[in-house]
């Protein structure tokens, strides 16, 4: 497994981490006391506010970012791109996404937007390094 391929796996796990963060405050509490509702999880998540709501939004955006990242890695590998360059772009994408999640949780909107753009730029670059 290349570093870029390992980054695909990590990127696939980031939304799950965001979901856990969003739900964490409700774990262990009864539903009647605002605890996580596994019978209606989407409705419960939609009712969140503050950092929990932002964690859920980061989860959704992390899923949205996956297709172009995975496609970029696959296209670059298919074109037999420079593996060190592809690995560097993949690591930069994962780092940007991790920073994006942190910025989202901290409510740093401008930083979040910059990191989102950097992550997208890494993905687009992957299509042209072959």
Image (cartoon, rainbow, N blue to C red):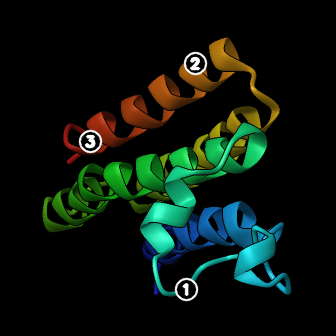
Q: Where is residue 14 in the image (x, y as percent from the top left)?
A: 58, 65
Q: Could you tell me which secondary element the residue under label 1 belongs to?
A: loop
Direction from residue 43 to residue 130 in the image, left or right? left
Q: Which residue lies furthest to the top in this view?
A: 110
* Residue under the point 55% across and 74% down: 13
Q: Can see residue 95? A: no
Q: Position of residue 28 (x, y in %)?
A: 85, 87
| Crowding near the residue tagged with mark 2, few <14, some 14–19, many ≥20 C-alpha atoms within 10 Å | some
Q: Position of residue 78 (x, y in %)?
A: 14, 67
* Residue under the point 79% across and 84% down: 30
Residue 114 marker = 2
Between residue 51 and residue 59, name the one nearer to us. Answer: 51
Direction from residue 84 to residue 26 in the image, left or right? right
Evaluate if marks 1 and 3 touch, with contact meaning CB atoms under 8 Å apart.
no
* Residue under the point 20% across and 58% down: 71
Eye-nearest disc, 2 or 1:
1
**Res 74 quadrant in image:** bottom left
Question: Which residue in the protein does label 3 denote?
Answer: 129
Question: CA gap, disc 2 to disc 1?
Answer: 34 Å
Q: Could you tell me which secondary element the residue under label 3 belongs to?
A: loop
Rendered position, 105 above or below 118 = below
* Residue under the point 25% across and 53% down: 72
Eye-nearest disc, 1 or 3:
1
Evaluate if marks 3 and 2 touch, with contact meaning CB atoms under 8 Å apart.
no
Q: Could you tell me which secondary element the residue under label 2 belongs to?
A: helix
**Res 77 quadrant in image:** bottom left
Direction from residue 22 to residue 56 in the image, left or right? left
Q: Can see residue 15? A: yes
Question: Which residue in the protein does label 1 denote?
Answer: 38
Question: CA gap, disc 3 to disc 2?
Answer: 23 Å
Q: Position of residue 104 (x, y in %)?
A: 68, 35
Q: Earlier in the sequence, mark 3 or mark 2?
A: 2
């Amino acid at each position: 497994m290349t570093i870029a391929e390992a980054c695909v796996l990590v990127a696939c796990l980031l939304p799950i981490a965001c979901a856990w963060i969003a739900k964490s405050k409700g774990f262990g509490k009864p539903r009647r006391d605002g605890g996580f509702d596994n019978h209606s999880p989407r409705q419960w998540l939609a009712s969140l506010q503050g950092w929990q709501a932002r964690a859920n939004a980061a989860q959704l955006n992390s899923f949205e970012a996956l297709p172009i990242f995975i496609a970029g890695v696959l296209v670059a590998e298919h074109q037999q791109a420079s593996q060190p360059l592809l690995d560097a772009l993949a690591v930069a994408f994962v780092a940007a996404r991790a920073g994006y999640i942190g910025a989202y949780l901290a409510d740093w909107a401008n930083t979040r937007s910059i990191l989102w753009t950097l992550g997208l730029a890494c993905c687009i670059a992957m299509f042209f390094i072959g």
